[in-house]
Image (tube, rainbow, N blue to C red):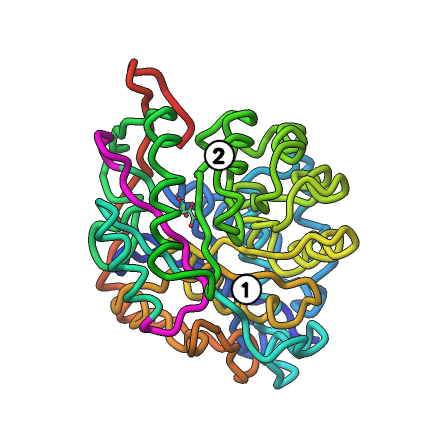
């Protein structure tokens, strides 16, 4: 029997920080897992290096489920982003190894394809409405069938979701950037620019919008109702998701579909949202929700209640997660959509073999395992560079949800 012989935590910053776990077996097979937790990267690196690596050496790499239970139940301290990201990295690396040993892509181990490719949505944004409309046109020309639209709210510094360079990258400063927020200004502005997107481009594509946890339940209900005739694919994170009950109130007032879950980490965090049918799309991801093993459990629960998948896929999710996500997405019966932002050229030099993108769809690799390799030499050129996500303050100076 092969055993786990080496466990390495690799930290690199090719345009942004990524933490990657590499497990090597006594047969020389390697597996990769993403362990990136934006703005708190080194906490997960330490969890892996100091607390999980010693437990993994000598274990059977084929026992994925048992290893998951061993790390989750064995910790005693349950759930939470650091724990669940660390367990996810181990889990995904073991799926990668299993695929390589079997000579099969991971999606074949998950039951094979349920669809040919995976519908993705991209991010259009603008510092004003004209720039946003130009961006939507640009993405349509590239073949995207689903587009998220965000414009900077006039008078507020640094609206979330608005790109500055080529890619949207919110973790851009060495200390958290202080941004301003006014719910009144947002609610007066956002429905109007979303209407302009529909006026200009019609209804022949999916339009999405992210509220980024900014509203109270009743404000979110008002927003959802005000955009009903625009037929959004979803309004994302209308309100902070820790309070699952809040979504009941939103639901009672609007038919605009609701997506949430990118900051949630376990099946327990989304249980009520799913079983009470308070959301339409669950946005938990491979990397932050315990890996392929646990995410499939969440998605299976969601399938029972007519909730579809819509996993997070921003730039802080490494190409290892993108690959793993596409293997899951292509196989589960209740797939909805996958977020896709892409990465910098430097990132793709470190992580090679990203899934193929064509006509707004991602296609998994047919290489054994995940189909991603890690170039140590290139990675060494990009040392860790501490960066934080911004914070939001209301106009009176008090903290708001970012
Ligand atoms: O992609 C999204 O929907 C986001 O909200 C992006 C997040 O702000 C980002 O991933 C935080 O790390």
Task: Look at the image and say whether residue 105 sits in the magenta stretch.
Answer: no
Q: Position of residue 367 (x, y in %)?
A: 52, 84
- Cβ of mark 2 under 8 Å from ligand 1: the answer is no
Count of numbered marks: 2
Quadrant location of the N terminus in the rendered image: bottom right
Q: Which is nearer the eye, 204 or 300?
A: 204
Q: Residue at x 44, y 44 (%)?
A: 210
Q: Of helix, strand and loop, which one carries label 1? A: helix
- Residue at (69%, 70%) from the top-left corner? 62
Nearest-to-viewer mark from 2 and 1: 2
Question: Does ligand 1 reach within 8 Å of label 1's beta carbon?
Answer: no
Range of residues picked out in magenta: 141-158
Determine whether the residue tagged by mark 2 lies in a helix, strand or loop.
helix
Secondary structure mainly formed by the magenta segment:
loop
In the image, residue 148 lies in the stretch drawn in magenta? yes
* Quadrant of the rendering where the C terminus is positioned: top left
- Residue at 42 percent of width and 78 percent of height: 358
Checking the image for residue 325, the label placed there is 1
Q: Nearer the viewer, residue 361 or 103?
A: 361
Could you tell me how far apart the alpha carbons at marks 2 and 1 are, in whole angstroms?
Answer: 30 Å
User: Label 2: which residue?
Assistant: 223
Left or right: where does residue 337 sit relative to residue 381?
right
N-terminal of the pair, mark 2 or mark 1, is 2
**Rendered view: 242 above or below 345:** above
Where, by quadrant of the figure, is residue 101 drawn?
bottom right
Q: Is residue 250 left or right of residue 399?
A: right
């Amino acid at each position: 029997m092969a055993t786990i012989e080496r466990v390495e935590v690799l930290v690199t910053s090719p345009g942004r920080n990524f933490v990657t776990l590499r497990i090597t077996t006594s047969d020389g097979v390697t597996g990769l897992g993403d362990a990136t937790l934006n703005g708190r990267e080194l906490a997960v690196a330490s969890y892996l290096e100091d607390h999980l690596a010693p437990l993994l050496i000598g274990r059977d790499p084929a026992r994925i489920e048992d290893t998951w239970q061993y790390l989750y139940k064995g910790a005693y301290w349950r759930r939470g982003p650091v724990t669940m990201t660390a367990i996810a990295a181990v889990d995904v690396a073991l799926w990668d190894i299993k695929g390589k040993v079997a000579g099969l892509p991971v999606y074949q181990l998950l039951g094979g394809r349920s669809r040919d490719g995976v519908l993705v949505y991209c991010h259009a944004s603008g510092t004003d409405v004209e720039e946003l409309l130009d961006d939507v046109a640009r993405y349509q020309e590239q073949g995207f069938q689903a587009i998220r639209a965000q414009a900077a709210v006039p008078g507020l510094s640094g609206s979330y979701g608005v790109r500055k360079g080529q890619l949207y990258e919110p973790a851009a400063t060495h200390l958290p950037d202080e941004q301003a927020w006014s719910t009144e200004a947002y609610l007066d502005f956002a429905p109007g620019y979303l209407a302009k997107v529909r006026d200009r481009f019609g209804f022949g594509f999916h339009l999405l919008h992210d509220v980024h946890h900014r509203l109270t339940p009743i404000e979110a209900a008002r927003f959802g109702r005000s955009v009903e005739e625009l037929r959004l694919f979803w309004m994302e994170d209308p309100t902070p998701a820790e309070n699952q009950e809040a979504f009941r109130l939103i639901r009672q007032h609007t038919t605009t579909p609701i997506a949430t879950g990118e900051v949630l980490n376990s099946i327990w965090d989304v249980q009520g949202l799913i079983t009470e049918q308070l959301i339409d799309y669950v946005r938990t991801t491979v990397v932050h929700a315990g890996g392929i093993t646990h995410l499939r459990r969440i998605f299976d629960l969601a399938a029972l209640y007519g909730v579809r998948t819509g996993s997070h896929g921003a730039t802080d999710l490494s190409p290892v997660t993108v690959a793993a996500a596409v293997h899951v997405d292509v196989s589960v019966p209740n797939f909805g959509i996958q977020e896709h932002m892409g990465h910098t050229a430097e990132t793709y030099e470190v992580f090679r073999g990203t899934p193929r993108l064509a006509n707004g769809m991602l296609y998994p690799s047919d290489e054994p395992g995940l189909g991603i390799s890690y170039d140590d030499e290139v990675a060494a050129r990009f040392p860790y560079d501490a960066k934080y996500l911004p914070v939001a303050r209301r106009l009176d100076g008090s903290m708001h949800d970012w």
